[in-house]
């Protein structure tokens, strides 16, 4: 059972019990565009308690706001009571919701193309906001006055750019002008919410266009203070040369590629990325230029190759060199590729010949020195200097002797 079938089953059941129930929002837009939707959301006039009474397995995640998750087979479907949101005190969160009609539920949504409903049983589109016309004209337009709608939730400005980027739609001039006017207000939105939309823009193949809009509207500067000028323009050039869909950390590294590493990393802090993502970006930015070094030893290359982000680093470097039209840099990357190819089937990430226990058994003392020993031994292994466990043991004994002599 697909998510769409699950949503349709839920709608059938709700309607059988006399409720109004429809597919809503993004999935209707995507169906009309002939694209697969990420998830199928249901909107209904049934109250959360009614929904929970009708379906045996539900999660009352946002029942207070009218949202219940219904579990059907292995699918999860969001079932939301028609609502209007009121009292956006801080330009972020509605302070209360009121249960209302489908028409009013449509008018609280962000953009006309996201404000339609669809009845999968009668196959009818229900459109209170002229979403169909904007979909046909490929336009992103707020439902109602943009100034007011952005004032309720400034995240919508970033969402406008995300949808424009992902769908390849233009943003209606009035809507766009309001984004420019209000861009500085984005700082009031939480980093986590900003990060989600930013990922949608920068990881998408059409990212260069989205990035150009972020700069032009002033959103880029408002999110990342100091992100302006020639170096910021360079970001668009680098982003446009990344291939296809990329990871968010790679996209952010490309976005910051015109600036010093520390500057970019500090600016990314606002996004509250996971530690893993932050490390990923840091690696990519800090290792810039590394792949261009003709002197890189075999061990260094193998170590880099064995790491998780090697091909992201390669992709970033290629995009940077292309953006600045550096023939030599591109030639260096081609040489590196040949070098990697010529490594053939060599295992680039062999298991260490000895583990920590082995090293301690040989007389190494647990602590920082043990780590250093393990590291140096691994390099010797990658260089081909030691090839068997026996050779490794011999190597370790010598290393420990040298340490002891050196330490005295
Ligand atoms: P995607 O396919 O990328 O998920 P979507 O349109 O489904 O796009 P969601 O963020 O999943 O976007 O939101 C679902 C629907 O909820 C939207 O289509 C829109 O109608 C409404 N919505 C979401 N966020 C907002 C918001 N900040 N302000 C107003 N309406 C919103
Ligand atoms: Mg969605």
Image (cartoon, rainbow, N blue to C red):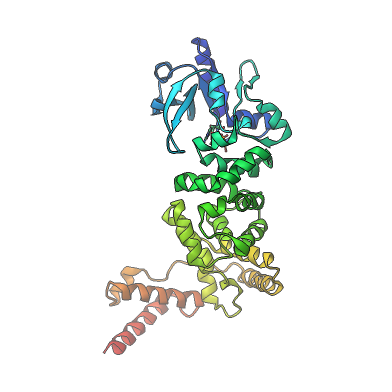
Side of 214 relative to 370 (left or right): right
Residue 9 location, x and y as percent? 53, 20
**Quarter of the image with the C terminus in it:** bottom left
In terms of depth relative to the viewer, which is nearer, 150 or 292?
150
In which quadrant of the rendered view does residue 391 lie?
A: bottom left
Pick out the residue farthest to the right. 137
Q: Is residue 42 left or right of residue 210?
A: left
How many discs mark residues in the rendered view? 0
The residue at the point 49 percent across, 28 percent down is 77
At x 59% / y 53%, what residue is drawn?
A: 246
Where residue 2 sits in the image (x, y, percent)? 56, 29
Which quadrant is the N terminus positioned in? top right
Residues 121 and 189: in front is 189
Residue for point 52% across, 74% down: 300
Note whether 84 is above or below 355 in the view shown: above
Q: Is 334 placed left or right of 197 in the picture?
A: right
Residue 361 position, x and y percent, is 28, 73
Residue occupying image coordinates x 48% and y 80%: 385
- Which quadrant of the structure image shows residue 95? top left
Q: Is residue 197 visible?
A: yes
Q: Nearer the viewer, residue 2 or 218?
A: 218
Residue 203 visible to the viewer? no
Q: Position of residue 5 (x, y in %)?
A: 57, 24
Q: Against 50, is 239 above or below?
A: below
């Amino acid at each position: 059972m697909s998510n769409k079938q699950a949503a349709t089953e839920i709608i059938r059941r709700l309607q059988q019990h006399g409720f109004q129930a429809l597919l809503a929002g993004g999935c209707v837009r995507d169906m009309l565009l002939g694209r697969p939707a990420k998830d199928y959301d249901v909107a209904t006039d049934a109250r959360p308690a009614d929904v929970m009474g009708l379906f045996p397995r539900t999660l009352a995640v946002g029942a207070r706001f009218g949202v219940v998750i219904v579990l059907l087979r292995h699918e999860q479907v969001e079932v939301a009571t028609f609502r209007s949101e009121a009292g956006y005190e801080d330009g972020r969160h509605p302070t209360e919701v009121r249960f209302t009609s489908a028409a009013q539920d449509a008018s609280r949504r962000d953009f006309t193309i996201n404000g339609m409903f669809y009845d999968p049983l009668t196959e009818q589109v229900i459109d209170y906001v002229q979403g169909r016309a904007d979909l046909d004209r490929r336009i992103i337009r707020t439902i109602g006055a943009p100034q007011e709608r952005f004032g309720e939730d400034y995240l919508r400005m970033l969402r406008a750019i995300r949808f424009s980027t992902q769908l390849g739609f233009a943003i209606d001039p009035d809507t766009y002008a309001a984004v420019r006017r209000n861009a500085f207000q984005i700082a009031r939105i939480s980093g986590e919410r900003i990060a989600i939309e930013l990922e949608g823009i920068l990881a998408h193949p059409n990212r260069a266009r989205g990035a150009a809009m972020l700069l032009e509207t002033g959103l880029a500067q408002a999110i990342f203070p100091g992100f302006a000028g020639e170096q910021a323009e360079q970001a668009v050039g680098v982003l446009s040369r990344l291939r296809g869909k990329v990871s968010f950390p790679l996209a952010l590294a490309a976005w910051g590629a015109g600036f010093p590493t520390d500057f970019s990393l500090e600016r990314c802090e606002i996004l509250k990325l996971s530690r893993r993502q932050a490390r990923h970006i840091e690696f990519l930015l800090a290792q810039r230029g590394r792949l261009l070094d003709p002197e890189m030893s075999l061990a260094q290359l193998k170590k880099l190759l064995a790491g998780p982000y090697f091909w992201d680093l390669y992709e970033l470097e290629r995009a940077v060199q292309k953006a600045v039209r550096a023939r030599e840099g591109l030639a260096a990357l081609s040489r590196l590729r040949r070098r990697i190819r010529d490594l053939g089937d060599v295992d680039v990430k062999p298991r260490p010949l000895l583990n920590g226990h082995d090293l301690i058994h040989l007389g190494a003392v647990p602590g920082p020195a043990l780590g250093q020993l393990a590291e140096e031994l691994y390099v010797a292994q990658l260089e081909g200097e030691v090839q068997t466990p026996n050779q490794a043991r011999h190597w370790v004994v010598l290393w420990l002797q040298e340490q002891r002599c050196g330490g005295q």
